[in-house]
Image: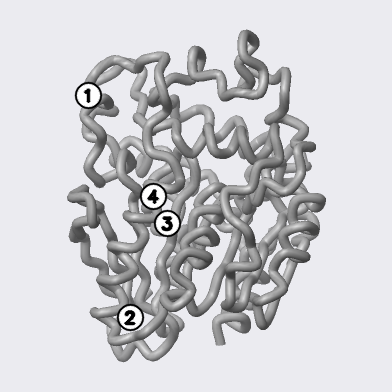
Amino acid sequence: MDVIRRDFTVRTVDGVTIAVREVRPVGHANRTPMILMHGTRIPGISEYDLPVANGSLAADLAAAGHICYIVDARGFGGSQRPDAMALPPQPSAPLVRCMEIMRDIDAAADHLRAASQSEKVGLFGWGVGGTCVAMYAALYPEKASHLVLYCMVYGATADHPLINIGSPWDDPENSGRFNQKVYGNYTFNGIEMLETHWDEQIPIDDKVAWRDPEMVVAFRNALLDGDPTARTRTPPTYRSPNGMLEDLYLMGAKGQKLFHASQIYCPVFIVNPEYDSLCRDTDMAVFCEDLYHSPEVIHWRAANSTHYLLLDRPERGRSELLVRLDGFLN
């Protein structure tokens, strides 16, 4: 695909260095500039720019005329990590909450606004990354033109089937609080976790028919490449801060909203895959009710699709997503 890539950094208002990958068309970029924000444990490039066929949403958007900035929040990927992540994990307060990530998104958004000479940018977020970009649009409505929320969590209802009171996420000694004794301030993640979760979502025995095996290899390599210490451990593991997990716990188990959607004033496109276990219809129903200042709300319940729709084979929903996304951003 005929696009240009560039890696650089920006500085936040509180002095943190944030890694950004720019993916842009070779020719004129005449469409909405886009911020792409990752989820709870996985840095940006592994979700949005894998070097395999159908593995780069950023390249697809760039080919359609968008400049894309893939952002790593602090503590993830190529961005600056809190000093505590150079020490063994501690059963203490999780690092890097969603509210802190607002500064990271804002630094990237301001850079993109200046570089593209655009007053506003579009924002795409995966999982709790969707929560983050929606929160950002609520805090900075003057900077947000479009919101695309993929497998998003709002926190309107405390009915999550996996993240609930009494689950491992819940502190048994202080029920209703995040279990930081188990999860701690940051986590070493094994790369097998990704494929296991993906396999569980695919509703047929022949996983290859649903997902290109090269996609899994590329995803694994991107996870390891995103942490310079990953291959120093046996087996290799990559680090991620747990602040987004605590926020996910509060939204899923306690029904606590991190913001109110009435503060969003731009068009919103919600992607809610059928087999995804994170995004819930009940949660999205309230979210859509709260979006009463948004001029357009599209809630696509993507039938027969997984949490990894963005990286599944094109006929498993990815092609339809790209068509719908292009229409929304147009």
Q: Are marks 1 and 2 in contact (CB under 8 Å)?
A: no
Q: Which residue is mark 4?
A: 101
Residue flagged by tag 1: what amino acid is it? Ala
Instruction: For marks 3 and 4, give the CA distance.
Output: 29 Å
Dot in front, 3 or 4: 4
Q: Nearer the viewer, residue 35 or 84?
A: 84
Could you tell which of marks 1 and 2 lies nearer the N-terminus? 2
Say few, some or many: other residues with alpha carbon within 10 Å of mark 4 (under 14 / 14 to 19 / 20 or more). Answer: many
Q: Which residue is mark 1?
A: 86
Q: Nearer the viewer, residue 67 or 125?
A: 125
Q: Which residue is mark 2?
A: 25
Q: Is residue 172 above or below residue 162?
A: above
Say few, some or many: other residues with alpha carbon within 10 Å of mark 3 (under 14 / 14 to 19 / 20 or more). Answer: some
Instruction: For marks 4 and 2, give the CA distance.
Output: 27 Å
> Residue 43 at x, y = what percent?
39, 45
255 sits left or right of 142 in the view: right
Dot in front, 4 or 2: 4
Q: Which residue is mark 3?
A: 52
Q: Is residue 303 above or below residue 211?
A: below
Q: Which type of secondary structure does the marked residue at label 2 adopt?
A: strand
Instruction: For marks 3 and 2, give the CA distance.
Output: 18 Å
Instruction: For marks 1 and 2, give the CA distance.
Output: 37 Å
Residue 107, image quadrant: bottom left
Say few, some or many: other residues with alpha carbon within 10 Å of mark 2 (under 14 / 14 to 19 / 20 or more). Answer: many
